[in-house]
Amino acid sequence: MIKAKCEFIHYICLLLNLQTGMKKLLPLIFLFFISLTAYTQQFNGGVMLAFVSSQVAGDTYAGFNKAGLAGGFFVSMDLNEKSALQMELHFIQKGSRYNDTTYQDDFQQYLLRLNYIDLPLLYLYKNKRFSFEAGISTSFLLSSYEEKDYFESTYDDWKKVCFNSVFGVKYKITPALEVGIRTSNSINSIRKNEVEGNVQRYSSQYGEFNDVLQLSLYYQIKALSD
């Protein structure tokens, strides 16, 4: 089982090594998971698919109006009957949307699409069919598109790497299937420079921040017991 865990972690590290901003963090993640193998009782893996609703705090367009999808893989390691650690690797669509409609007086339009690879690292507390999760995720920007009043912005002002706090709850429908609700909020600004409307979060610096609500399905493909 330990060999299988190491192979999975090695595969994840190879994928993440494509992102230069992750190179300094990879050895820490690798050593962290290797140290857990001596204590974990069960290793679980599977796939996840999610519906995403997002906004950007600090862009002056309030509301979770940008719809998107997320999908990828997860691996969890049981620490005991009540707790586990979970690591995920998935693609996720974030951003902001403000539509020009007949009942609005400002006649403004805005669209921001931000596509990321997300790497959440979570602690899970289990209580019967429910699991409560908390942790942090690292987001790697793959692509961006910004449009204001139907004109595309060609200015690249988005940070390639950002960090997020993650909190959520999951409910086990069957032994292999879970449904979860999660909120994810940027810790550092997603924009390189300050612009009009920027807000503060966790520091004295102004910026823009991703706020995400996520409804997910998790399907466990395989479990390896000691």
Image (cartoon, helix red, strand yellow):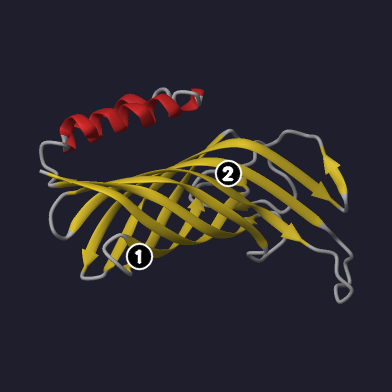
Give the quadrant of the N terminus. top left
The structure residue drawn at horizontal position 73% and vertical position 45%, both measured from the top left corner, is: 195
Estimate the x, y position of residue 80 in percent, counting from the top left: 13, 54
Residue 146 shows in this picture: yes
Quadrant of the image occupied by residue 16:
top left
Q: Which residue is mark 1?
A: 170
Estimate the x, y position of residue 8 in percent, counting from the top left: 30, 33
Going from N to C along the chain, the mark reached first, 1 or 2, is 1
Asked if residue 59 lies left or right of residue 31, the reply is right
**Residue 189: mark in rendering:** 2
Quadrant of the image occupied by residue 189:
top right
Classed neighbour count for the residue bearing mark 1: other residues with Cα under 10 Å, few (<14), some (14–19), many (≥20):
many
Q: Nearer the viewer, residue 1 or 10?
A: 1
The structure residue drawn at horizontal position 37% and vertical position 56%, both measured from the top left corner, is: 219
The structure residue drawn at horizontal position 85% and vertical position 73%, both measured from the top left corner, is: 104
**CB under 8 Å between callouts 1 and 2?**
no
Estimate the x, y position of residue 103 in percent, counting from the top left: 86, 77
Q: Outermost residue, front direction?
A: 221
Estimate the x, y position of residue 226 in percent, counting from the top left: 10, 43
Circle 2 — which element? loop
Classed neighbour count for the residue bearing mark 2: other residues with Cα under 10 Å, few (<14), some (14–19), many (≥20):
many
Circle 1 — which element? strand
Q: Outermost residue, bottom direction?
A: 103
The amino acid type, in three-letter code, at marker 2 is Ser
The amino acid type, in three-letter code, at marker 1 is Lys
Asked if residue 217 lies left or right of residue 41, the reply is right
